[in-house]
Amino acid sequence: MLEKRDFYIGGGWTAPATPKDFAVIDPSTEEQCAVISLGDQADTDAAVAAARGSFDGWSQTSRGEREALLRKLLAIYEDRAEEMAQAMSLEMGAPIELSRAQQVGAGSWHMKGFLKAFETFSFERDFTATEKTLLEPIGVCALITPWNWPMNQIVLKVIPALATGCTVVLKPSEVAPLSGHLFAEFVHEAGFPAGVFNLVNGDGAGVGSQLSAHPGVDMVSFTGSTRAGIAISKAAADTLKRVSLELGGKGANIIFDDAHPKAAKQGAIRCFRNSGQSCNAPTRMLVHRSRYDEAVATAAEVAEATHVGPASEEGKHIGPVVSEAQFDKIQKLIETGMGEARLVAGGLGRPDGLNRGYYVKPTVFADVTNDMTIAREEIFGPVLSIIPFDEEAEAIAIANDTPYGLTNYIQTEDDDKRRRVARQLRSGMVETNGQGFAQGSPFGGYKQSGNGREGGTYGLEEFLEVKAVSGWAAE
């Protein structure tokens, strides 16, 4: 069993002030695979003090110095990619093939995107002939990351914060902390100055709340549930610190009558990917009435054909969900759905042949209406709800009738319709016809899906203050 109790504070590994063991569970087996310690106020204070103490020096380093260290970090990340893949597969149940290609790959993809944006990013901008606008690091940043895409979210926060001259305290999810611990090793190996990057493990009620309210923290960047995002915003309000939030989603995938024949199949596969544990998953499939029966049958076939198995198993499949609590939540919502809509695939319990581990059957509900619980709540599991529509305006209204606004999807061969509908969807992102987003594209949502943007130039700007200076040039 792995023992990872220490925190990374002030440039070295430090024992907890008051050890509080927390078991890390392998969701494929339900067995303990590691132990960490949860931090307390003394650990949080020490990490914030280290970040505060290093801010003046780090914020004044040249962009060339910061870029060189970030490029070294990227090289280490790529050299030790297999270690990272194994860590994420173990801690949160990502199948090893997906962990190598997508979980690890997301981290290196975003690092390269930030470095590309950083090359041409201007921290000084001429406003008039005599006035300059300066973009300066906001200060000490508390970065609170989730368990479902560990490196994706750690990189989307840590890299732009460090690139812009901020110092950070990272609190990864206590449910999946091994990848964050390994990332701290990479930072140390890269040679960042002591105190620039710090890591303290803890839960939301403990270290998370302490960081959110801490007077020494200038900004909180959080990815997780909307409920927790609201709590963090309230805790941060007393010190008026900046809060950037990437929260839940209930994405609508609108399949029009002229959509590609494989639209429903691709939409179902996308919904089930990562065991449905993605905030931008297309979990509501809105299908034109003329294609509805076909789409229901196709989605059911995809669900039945989706292999579920241990994270260590090679090949394409989905693994377990992350924890017992998550498994129980999903089961309750599936049970609710069975009383609301028509179950066409999956359902309650584990897939056949799996009697241990947090495995969920890929599940499809048909004849769903948008007022049902399964259409409104973020289930965060491999559960798809299919809703029919007749007219374009009806599809847009259904898609927008949600408290969330992260990612919506459009499937149509009509370019005018595709652009027209995209303009009317209330979400931070709209993916059309399966075309993925470019490197550095802004990631974030509307409404209760959060505020702020991550990735590329937009992600760098999140960690900067704007200063206007008059009389910069002689009149």
Image (spheres, rainbow, N blue to C red):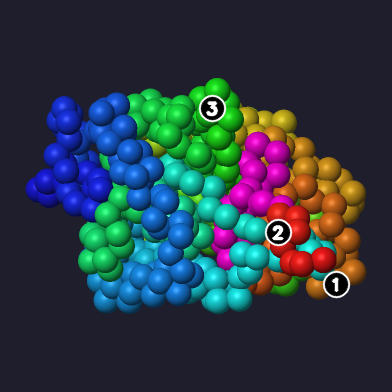
- What is the C-alpha distance between the residues marked 1 and 2? 40 Å
The correct choice, above or below, for 435 with respect to 333 in the image is below
Name the residue tied to disc 2. 133
Name the mark nearer the viewer: 1 or 2. 2
Please give the name of the residue rendered at 82% of the width and 66% of the height, measured from the top-left corner.
Answer: 475
Residue 458 covered by magenta stretch: yes
For marks 3 and 2, give the CA distance: 26 Å
The local crowd at label 2, few if under 14, some if 14 to 19, many if 20 or more residues have their Cα within 10 Å, is some
Q: Is residue 33 left or right of residue 90?
A: left
Span shown in magenta: 445-468
Three-letter amino acid code of the residue under disc 2: Thr
Q: Position of residue 179 (x, y in %)?
A: 29, 55
Mark 3 vs 2, N-terminal side: 2
Mark 1 nearby-residue class (10 Å; few <14, some 14–19, many ≥20): few
Kind of element beneath mark 2: strand
* Furthest residue toward front: 474
Disc with the residue nearer the chain's start (1 vs 2): 2
